[in-house]
Amino acid sequence: MSQEVLILGLNPAWQRLFYLDKFTPGEVHRIERVEEYGSGKGINCALVLRLLGGSPLMMHFLGSEHGSRIFDEISAYGIQQAPVWIKEPTRICTTIVSGGDSTELIEPSPVLTEYENEDFIQTLNDYWSSTQSVALCGTFPLGFNIEQLNALDFAGKKIYVDAIEGIDTWLEKGVELLKINMQEYCKLLTRLGLPIVLSSPQFWKMTATAVLERLPIKALVVTDEDAPVRAFRLVEKKFQGVQIQPPQIQVNNRIGAGDSFFAGWLYADGMGMDFEHCLIKATAVATARCEVDRPCNLKLERVAEVEMMLADAVEKLE
């Protein structure tokens, strides 16, 4: 995969990971192990895409000491960056991992100034015309001028989105992939005025068809933790839906599983894989990510093993 992917992960975080045998709110805990590293949806995606053999260009807002540490760490992984340096510090995300469960404490994002917004769009314009593939990951910082992003010319570009807030204009212009989780899918249905009747056996076909008919989305994917991953598209205006059940594994840490799935799909699509094989690859990547402590420790041989396990696991949704 030689094609470069511009990853807009505009709201990164410095991750503090606390490991405990047992976490009980209201009690004093002695932490067994602490890890700290750069994180956030865009960073997780870029790290995994790089491991898979992709060529990410990471663009993000970085501030203060933690921003500098993120820049140095991502550079050490061989990932090209186009940082926009800001006055306020990069937020900290503190995660407590205990017994396979994670509790996340996320600080508010930094608030951008008008000058920092101008710096962002000028930096982005330096890369936009030469970029064919763009991946938008996660939320925007407070004070971000979304209108300047929406005003960009999308002609000739493949746009991939792993976000739900502030993306309506992007979806209306047309995207290759919208990857969201179940909670986000319900938000999207509500925004579109579509009923959410989960008990209906036709829920997925009816809602996904309605979304794809209203918005020029080539592939819609909905993840839901341990439940099947579902992917939808319209082929010559006819509904096509498939699902795949991730295998049962010993979970080490789920942080960044969705971001890893997104990276797996980006890689597979960039390699020219078909719809179902993109789903298999992405699910295998997300599964293998959950078995290790950090996205950067993903094992490619394990990804290949899970792909083999899932090769005949794709089910059609009628």
Image (tube, grey):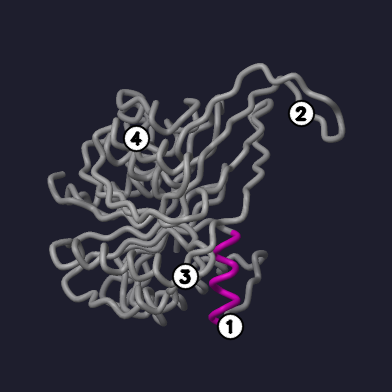
What is the C-alpha distance between the residues marked 1 and 3? 13 Å
Query: Which residue is at 56% across, 63% downward?
Result: 184
| Front: mark 2 or 3 | 2
- Along the polypeptide, which appears first: circle 1 or circle 2? 2
The residue to which callout 3 is attached is 208
* Helix, strand or loop for disc 4: helix
Residue 198 picture location, percent across and down: 65, 65
Amino acid at dot 4: Asp
Look at the numbered discs 2 and 3 and tell me whether their residues touch, using CB distance below 8 Å.
no
Relative height, residue 208 to residue 306 (above, below): below
The residue to which callout 2 is attached is 23
Stretch of the chain drawn in magenta: 183-192
Q: Nearer the viewer, residue 135 or 14?
A: 14
* Helix, strand or loop for disc 1: loop
Is residue 234 left or right of 222 when viewed as pictured?
left
What is the C-alpha distance between the residues marked 1 and 4? 45 Å
Magenta: predominant secondary structure element? helix
Residue 68 picture location, percent across and down: 40, 40
| Front: mark 1 or 2 | 2
What is the C-alpha distance between the residues marked 4 and 2? 32 Å
Q: Residue furthest top?
A: 32
Q: Which mark is residue 72?
A: 4
- Could one spot residue 108 in this view of the protein? yes
| Front: mark 4 or 2 | 4
Look at the numbered discs 1 and 4 and tell me whether their residues touch, using CB distance below 8 Å.
no
Residue 174 picture location, percent across and down: 31, 75
- Along the polypeptide, which appears first: circle 3 or circle 4? 4
Amino acid at dot 2: Phe
Amino acid at dot 1: Gly
